[in-house]
Image: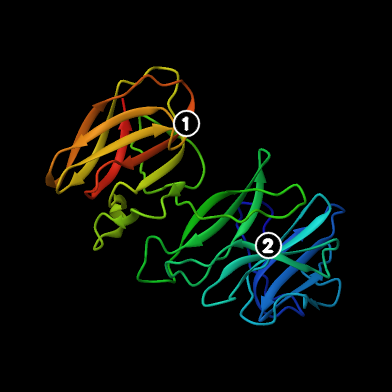
Amino acid sequence: MADKPTGPFVPEPQPIKGVRGIDPNVLIDKDGQAYLYWSQGNIYAAKLKPNMLELASEPVTLGELPTKGLKEGPFVFERKGIYYLTYPHVENKTERLEYATSTSPLGPFTVKGVIMDESPTGCWTNHHSLLPFNNQWYLFYHHNDLSPAFDKSRSVRLDSLFFEPNGAIRKVVPTLRGVGLTDARQKIQLDRYSRLSSRGASIAFLDPADTFQGWKTVLADNQGWVQYNGVAFGKQALKTVTLRVQAAAGATVQLRTDGATGPLLAQVTVPKGSQWQEVKASVAALKPGTHTLIVSAKTNTPVEIDWVKFE
């Protein structure tokens, strides 16, 4: 315990009596009543006393959840009178994020659907939390991006989350881009994409032996494109764009704003070469403000892009 959010914290000599398990989560309801949720095969819940150190009710098993596959990491919140119990669940081979709803903090809960599908790239776990900020909800979760060969080292990811009019949670597709704005005059790392074409585009490490150097975007042919949301172009006109690129056989790349059929911002000819090079091109007139950036290949030869920067 501590007197301030920043500590120092002093551990209690004994765990909370009646609680056995992992991944604790506390919900403080609108009336001030606190509830504790935790997992140990199943997910359990109980009221907490005002001292937050003792249970005020017997634990209940939230048994309306799937019985097959591991469930853990509960995170509970209330929105518009609906209580959302969210949790990782191994439906197939690795964890995906699911949710159930109730009109009571202790249930019964009804399983509603999937928040995020299991990872196709091998991170076995996916623990999470959901929070609103400035009228926008966000999903915090994790992945082993920086340690692909070691699943136990994980880094934080963050994406926007939306609710349907009926209160259902819209499934979140991991973007790598996350949230926020990027100044057009900074190096725009396209590998942190918002959307990626299903064909002809992929992300790879710049150096697999040194993963902390980051990633590159690989456009294999003219089917490949990448979308990067939230580029702040500002009010002052930009004249050029520079790409750090590599194309063994040469390539042509187009940059557009606000969609695949949006205004053409620049067309860049990438010379042949087996080394990274910085290629500059002129930029067409652009309406001031924040735009989505689309980068696509216009030739059938592979091109690799490290970053894009406007001046």
The kind of residue on which mark 1 rests is His
User: Is residue 5 depicted above or below 67 in this figure?
Assistant: above
Q: How crowded is mark 2: few (under 14 residues within 10 Å), some or many (20 or more)?
A: few
Which label number is shown at residue 1? 2
The reply, left or right, for residue 105 in relation to residue 23 is: right
Which label number is shown at residue 291? 1
User: Is residue 141 depicted above or below 70 in this figure?
Assistant: above
The quadrant of the image that shows the C terminus is top left
Secondary structure of the residue carrying tag 2 is loop
Mark in the foreground, 2 or 1:
1
The reply, left or right, for residue 305 in relation to residue 126 is: left
User: Is residue 211 depicted above or below 188 in this figure?
Assistant: below
The kind of residue on which mark 2 rests is Met
- Measured as percent of width and height from the top left, residue 100 is found at 74, 65
Q: Residue at x 59, y 76 (%)?
A: 91
Of residues 134 and 289, the one drawn nearer to the viewer in this rendering: 289
Which label number is shown at residue 121? none
Residue 187, picture quadrant: top left
User: Is residue 63 depicted above or below 183 in this figure?
Assistant: below
The reply, left or right, for residue 256 in relation to residue 6 is: left
- Measured as percent of width and height from the top left, residue 221 is found at 28, 50
Q: Residue at x 81, y 77 (%)?
A: 60
Asked if residue 52 shows in the view, the reply is no
The quadrant of the image that shows the N terminus is bottom right
- Measured as percent of width and height from the top left, residue 160 is found at 58, 47
